[in-house]
Image (cartoon, helix red, strand yellow):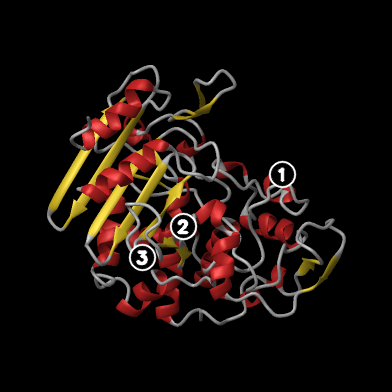
């Protein structure tokens, strides 16, 4: 029977196919960290607390926080229409029915706002049914997914997005992923800086997150893990090596999932939120980020992704204790590369687990669930 964090992680790594994992459970100054397995399936380097991972969608809360910095700066407002910075979205078309053909469209009934992007209710993104025609261009043209380095540069990406109809009217439905990428472009245009530069200057440097960014420097590649997915034979197959897509700056810095990081870097971000912004953000901004914005109907329609919980800005917010690890107000998210990070304002807990095996779908794998269960008990 597993008795500590190491046992939980080791139980999954030892049976495969996940090559390794790093877990962290913190409450105040009490921190438990364990690193098990290897950075690759060949076992060329042991996993360590300092290992760097492609964190995928736990990028999203960080980009949501960056947008709130601009709100506090007075550069953007949550209720502002986005077409001021994203003119490509000035007159969006919306599918007459979400499952309808791409050419059966009607005009949007109102502009898309910054708040729509923050809450994933702009009309762009993944619904529960991936088979509807409106989803295909998100993959084929926008290159949505866990390998964002394939996406074109922001201006070209936005021009492509403008040709894709919304699945729902703005504000009507929660849809996954795409809004964070749009938000990343908006941040860059509103500041006149690239998204990587803005995040580095305003978040990573002030919080002491030296290993977080959109590229891994050459000198740090020995700490960078390999990234895998389950192949047809059930074994892990290499998707990206340390010298691959993240060894140079991508054309499109994905606000939805492009960052690399470590457990301690994400811990620094979480502690900022737990400290009511820690002097970086205002307490009001943190409350806005970590408050559920969805209607009961929107939560129900999005159950494939958020399992009955709510959504704030860039991350889920627990509203019901469906499972042992759900705590009302618990905020965070999971990443398709096998990552998860949450913080609980009511308890002061932070739970982060980074691995390098791609999720096979929106449902979190047993490794994550066992980690959450352990953290809740701890």
Label 3–label 2 contact, CB within 8 A: no
Label 1–label 3 contact, CB within 8 A: no
Q: Few, some or many C-alpha atoms within 10 Å of disc 1 (few <14, some 14-19, many ≥20)?
A: few
Q: Toward the viewer: 338 or 48?
A: 338
Q: CA distance from mark 1 to mark 3?
A: 33 Å
**Residue 113 point in image, percent of width and height:** 60, 76
Q: Which residue is mark 3?
A: 202
Q: Which residue is mark 2?
A: 60
Picture layout, residue 167 above or below residue 261: below
The residue located at (20%, 41%) in the rendering is 33
Q: Quadrant of the N terminus?
A: top left
The residue located at (31%, 47%) in the rendering is 352
Element class at badge 3: helix
Q: CA distance from mark 3 to mark 2?
A: 16 Å
Q: Residue furthest right?
A: 103
Q: Toward the viewer: 18 or 228?
A: 18
Label 3 vs 2, first from the N-terminus: 2
Q: Nearer the viewer, mark 3 or mark 2?
A: 2
**Residue 155 point in image, percent of width and height:** 66, 59
Q: Which residue is mark 1?
A: 140
């Amino acid at each position: 029977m597993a008795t500590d964090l190491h046992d939980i992680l080791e139980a999954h790594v030892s049976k495969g196919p996940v090559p390794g994992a790093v877990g962290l459970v913190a409450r105040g100054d009490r921190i438990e960290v364990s690193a098990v397995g290897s950075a690759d399936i060949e076992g060329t380097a042991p996993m360590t607390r300092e290992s760097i991972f492609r964190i995928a969608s736990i990028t999203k809360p960080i980009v949501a926080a960056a947008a709130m910095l601009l709100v506090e700066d007075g550069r953007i407002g949550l209720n502002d229409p986005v077409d001021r910075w994203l003119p490509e979205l000035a007159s969006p078309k919306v599918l007459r029915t979400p499952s309808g053909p791409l050419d059966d469209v009607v005009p949007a009934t109102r502009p898309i706002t910054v708040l729509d992007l923050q809450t994933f209710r702009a009309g762009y993104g993944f619904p529960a049914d991936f088979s509807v025609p409106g989803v295909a261009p998100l993959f084929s043209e926008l290159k949505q997914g866990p390998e964002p380095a394939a996406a074109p540069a922001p201006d070209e990406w936005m021009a492509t997005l403008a040709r894709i109809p919304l699945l729902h009217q703005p504000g009507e439905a929660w849809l996954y992923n795409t809004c964070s990428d749009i938000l990343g472009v908006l941040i860059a245009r509103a500041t006149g800086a690239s998204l990587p530069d803005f995040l580095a200057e305003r978040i990573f440097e002030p919080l002491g997150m030296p290993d977080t960014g959109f590229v891994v420097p050459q000198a740090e590649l020995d700490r960078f893990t390999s990234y895998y997915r389950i192949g047809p034979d059930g074994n892990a197959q290499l998707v990206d090596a340390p010298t691959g897509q993240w060894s140079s700056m991508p054309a499109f810095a994905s606000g939805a999932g492009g960052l690399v990081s470590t457990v301690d870097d994400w811990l620094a971000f979480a502690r900022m939120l737990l400290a009511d912004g820690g002097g970086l953000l205002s307490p009001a901004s943190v409350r806005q980020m970590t408050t559920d914005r969805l209607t009961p109907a929107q939560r129900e329609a999005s159950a494939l992704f958020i399992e009955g919980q709510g959504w704030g800005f860039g991350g889920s917010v627990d509203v019901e204790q469906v499972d042992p690890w759900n705590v009302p107000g618990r905020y965070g998210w999971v990443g398709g590369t096998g990552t998860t990070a949450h913080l609980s304002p009511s308890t002061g807990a932070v739970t982060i687990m980074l691995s390098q095996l791609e999720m096979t779908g929106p449902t979190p794998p047993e490794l994550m669930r066992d980690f959450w269960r352990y953290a809740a008990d701890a």
